[in-house]
C-alpha cells in the first residue's frame, strides 16, 4: 500500500457510498482515494503525508453537472451578459452601457433575458431600438430558445412581414403582420448566421473559462448537451473540445454529447458521429484525472412551454389548436434511436412537454428498453405524465432534470403557468413522483439557461422555493410559496442526484461521484454540513474548496 500524499480529516465527510455513507477521514495517493476511515488512513499516513484539517467543515464528493452548455455560457461571459440581473430597466441600462463600451463592434451581442420583465412576457424590437439603433443587436434569452433583435438586425437579415417561418422555428409577428423582433428556435439562425465569425480559439477560451467557473462551484465533471453545430452555436464546438483534450487541458471529467443535426441526412450523420467518437477516444487520457469522452448523442425533440414550442398532449390554455413543435416525427425519431443503439451510443433526448416525453420513451423502449450498460436519458421533463415515469423506471431511463426551475418565480408564474391547464400544472417538475416511481434522478443546470450552482439547485429540490440570493427569485412568491410542495425530495436524494447519479448519467460513475477506495479524489469542501443546516437556508451553504483528482483547483478567497 503506498503512502498517502494527503489525508483529509477533522470534519464531517459524506461519501455517497450506500455501504458507508459517512466517515471521518479519507486518504489520497496520486489523485486516487486509497483509504477511507480514520484507522485505515492512519495506516497509510507517513512522514511525507500532508494532513489537511477540515476544521469542522464538511467534505462531500465533487459535483457533476449532467446537462450544461459551457460553450454558450463561456461566450456569454464576455458578451453583454444579463444573467446576474433581473428587470426591464436594468436590462436596457446594461445593454446601453455595453454598447457604449464597445463602439467599434459591428453587432451588439448578448444573452440572459427573462421574458417576465416584458409586457405580455415577450420583448419587442422597439425596446432594443431605444438603446441600440445605430447597428444590429441580438440578445438571446436565458433559455436559448428565443432571440430578441432590434429593427436594424431585422433589416440586415432581410426579415419582413412576408418572410415565412423556417422549419422548426417561428418569426413572431404583431396583429398587423409585422415582425416584432422576437425569433424562436431555428428562426434565430436567420440572424445568427450573420454574426461576426467566432473562431475555434474563441471557443477554447470559453471552455477554459467555463471550467474555471465550474470549479468555483465545486463541479468536477460535466456533460455538454450538444457538441457540434447546434442552434445558437457560433462554430462547430467539436474541434475546440478535441484541441483542449489533446493538450491535457481538462482538469475535469467531461462527456461530449454529440449533437444530432436534423439538417444532415441520417446515414451521413451516423457516420459523422461515429468518426467523432473514435477521434475523441483516440486521445490518451487517465479517466481518474479527467479528460474527454464521447459516449452520448443529444437529440432535441421539442422546444419550451414559455414560447408555445414545448410539445404537449393537450393544447395550451388559451391557444386551442397549439400543441407545440416537434423537431422529429415518431417514425423518424425511432429510426434515429435504433441506429444509435446499434452503434453503442447512449441517447440523450430533450423533451419538455408530455407529448415529447411519450415519444422519447416510445423510441427508447422500442427494442425492449436499453440494456443495463446503456445510459439513455430524457432531459428536462417539465410536464411528465406519471404513466411515462413508470415506463422510464422499468426501462432504466434516467430523468436528467434541472432542479433550479422547480419554484414559483416570476418567470414561471407570469409566463408559463398561464399557458398550462390545471392538470398540466399538477405534473410540473414532479421530482418526488419520479423518485417514487423508481426513476433515477440526475441533476444538471442547462447553464447558461440557469445558474450552474449545485447548492442552489439542491435548495430548490429540497424546498421548492428560490434560494435567498438568486437574483431571478427575489419576489415573495418565489421565496415563500413552494411549487407543488409534495414534490420535495430530501437533502440526501438531492446530493446524490448531483454527485453519484450525475456521474452515472455522464458515464463517469466508475471513477467519480462518491468517496470510495479506488475512485478519483474529487471533493467539494463546504463551510457547513448541508444535512445540519435548516433546510430553508440550504442555499446559503458556501463552497470553500474544490479538489479534482487530488489537486486543489479552487479555493474561496
Image (cartoon, rainbow, N blue to C red):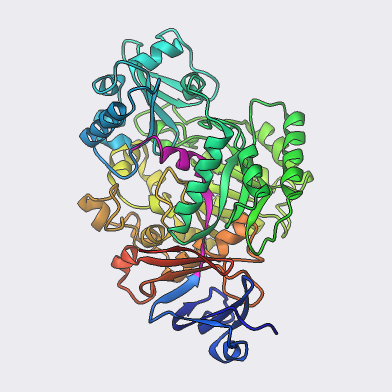
Residue 316, horizontal then vertical, whole percent: 40, 33
Q: Magenta includes 408?
A: no
- What is the number of callouts on the image? 0
Q: Horizontally, is 388 left or right of 160 in the view?
A: right
Residue positioned 53% across, 32% down in the render: 233
Q: Nearer the viewer, residue 518 or 226?
A: 518
Residue 46 lies, with reference to residue 96, above or below; the image says below
Is residue 438 visible in the rendered image? The answer is no
Residue positioned 47% across, 53% down in the render: 212
Quadrant where the N terminus sits is bottom right
Residue 68, horizontal then vertical, whole percent: 51, 47
Residue positioned 31% across, 15% down in the render: 134
Quadrant of the rendered image containing residue 412: top left
Q: Horizontally, is 86 left or right of 147 in the view?
A: left
Residue 261 lies, with reference to residue 213, above or below; the image says above
Quadrant of the rendered image containing residue 11: bottom left
Is residue 516 visible in the rendered image? The answer is yes
Residue 184 lies, with reference to residue 485, above or below; the image says above
Residue 271, horizontal then vertical, whole percent: 77, 35
Q: Horizontally, is 29 left or right of 457 in the view?
A: right
Magenta residue span: 61-81
Residue 291 lies, with reference to residue 62, above or below; the image says above
Residue 174, horizontal then vertical, whole percent: 32, 16
Q: Magenta includes 77?
A: yes
Q: Residue furthest front?
A: 48
Amino acid at each position: 500500500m503506498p503512502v498517502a500524499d494527503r489525508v483529509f480529516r477533522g470534519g464531517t465527510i459524506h461519501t455517497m457510498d450506500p455501504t458507508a455513507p459517512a466517515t471521518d477521514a479519507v486518504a489520497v495517493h496520486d489523485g486516487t482515494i486509497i483509504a477511507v476511515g480514520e484507522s485505515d488512513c492512519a495506516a497509510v499516513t507517513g512522514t511525507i503525508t500532508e494532513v489537511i484539517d477540515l476544521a469542522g467543515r464538511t467534505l462531500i464528493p465533487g459535483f457533476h453537472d449532467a446537462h450544461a452548455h459551457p460553450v454558450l455560457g463561456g461566450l456569454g461571459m464576455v458578451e453583454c451578459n444579463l444573467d446576474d440581473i433581473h428587470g426591464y430597466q436594468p436590462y436596457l441600462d446594461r445593454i446601453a452601457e455595453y454598447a457604449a463600451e464597445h463602439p467599434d463592434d459591428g453587432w451588439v451581442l448578448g444573452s440572459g433575458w427573462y421574458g417576465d420583465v416584458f409586457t405580455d412576457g415577450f420583448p419587442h424590437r422597439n425596446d432594443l431600438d431605444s438603446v441600440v439603433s445605430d447597428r444590429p443587436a441580438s440578445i438571446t434569452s436565458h433559455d436559448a430558445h428565443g432571440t430578441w433583435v432590434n429593427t436594424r438586425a431585422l433589416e440586415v437579415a432581410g426579415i419582413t412581414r412576408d418572410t415565412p417561418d423556417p422549419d422548426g422555428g417561428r418569426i413572431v409577428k404583431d396583429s398587423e403582420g409585422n415582425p416584432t423582433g422576437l425569433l424562436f428556435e431555428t428562426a434565430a439562425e436567420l440572424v445568427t448566421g450573420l454574426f461576426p465569425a467566432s473562431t475555434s480559439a474563441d471557443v477554447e477560451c470559453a471552455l477554459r473559462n467555463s471550467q474555471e467557473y465550474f470549479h468555483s462551484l465545486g463541479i468536477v465533471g460535466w456533460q455538454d448537451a450538444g457538441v457540434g453545430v447546434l442552434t445558437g452555436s457560433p462554430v462547430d464546438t467539436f474541434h475546440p473540445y478535441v484541441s483542449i483534450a489533446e493538450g491535457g487541458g481538462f482538469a475535469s471529467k467531461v462527456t461530449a454529447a454529440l449533437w444530432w443535426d436534423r439538417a444532415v441526412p441520417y446515414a451521413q450523420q451516423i457516420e459523422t458521429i461515429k468518426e467523432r467518437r473514435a477521434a475523441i477516444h483516440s486521445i490518451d487520457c487517465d479517466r481518474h484525472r479527467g479528460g474527454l469522452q464521447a459516449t452520448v448523442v443529444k437529440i432535441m425533440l421539442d422546444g419550451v412551454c414559455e414560447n408555445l414550442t414545448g410539445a404537449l398532449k393537450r393544447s395550451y390554455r388559451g391557444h386551442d389548436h397549439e400543441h407545440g413543435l416537434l423537431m422529429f416525427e415518431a417514425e423518424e425519431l425511432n429510426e434515429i434511436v435504433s441506429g444509435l443503439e446499434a452503434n453503442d451510443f447512449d441517447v440523450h433526448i430533450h423533451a419538455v412537454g408530455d407529448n415529447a416525453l411519450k415519444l422519447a420513451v416510445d423510441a427508447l423502449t422500442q427494442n425492449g428498453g436499453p440494456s443495463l450498460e446503456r445510459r439513455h436519458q430524457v432531459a428536462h421533463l417539465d410536464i411528465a405524465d406519471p404513466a411515462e415515469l413508470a415506463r422510464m423506471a422499468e426501462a432504466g431511463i434516467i430523468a436528467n432534470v434541472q432542479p433550479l426551475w422547480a419554484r414559483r418565480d416570476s418567470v414561471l408564474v407570469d409566463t408559463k403557468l398561464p399557458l398550462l391547464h390545471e392538470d398540466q400544472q399538477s405534473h410540473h417538475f414532479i421530482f418526488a413522483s419520479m423518485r417514487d416511481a423508481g426513476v433515477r434522478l440526475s441533476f444538471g443546470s442547462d447553464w447558461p439557461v440557469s445558474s450552474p450552482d449545485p447548492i442552489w439547485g439542491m435548495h430548490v429540490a429540497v424546498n421548492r422555493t428560490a434560494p435567498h440570493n438568486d437574483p431571478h427569485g427575489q419576489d415573495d412568491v418565489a421565496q415563500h410559496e413552494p411549487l407543488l410542495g409534495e414534490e420535495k425530495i430530501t437533502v440526501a436524494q438531492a446530493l446524490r442526484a448531483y454527485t453519484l447519479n450525475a456521474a452515472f448519467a455522464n458515464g463517469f460513475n466508475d471513477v467519480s461521484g462518491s468517496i470510495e477506495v479506488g475512485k478519483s479524489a474529487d471533493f467539494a469542501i463546504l463551510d457547513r454540513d448541508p444535512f445540519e443546516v435548516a433546510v430553508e437556508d440550504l442555499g446559503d451553504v458556501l463552497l470553500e474548496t474544490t479538489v479534482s483528482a487530488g489537486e486543489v483547483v479552487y479555493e474561496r478567497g
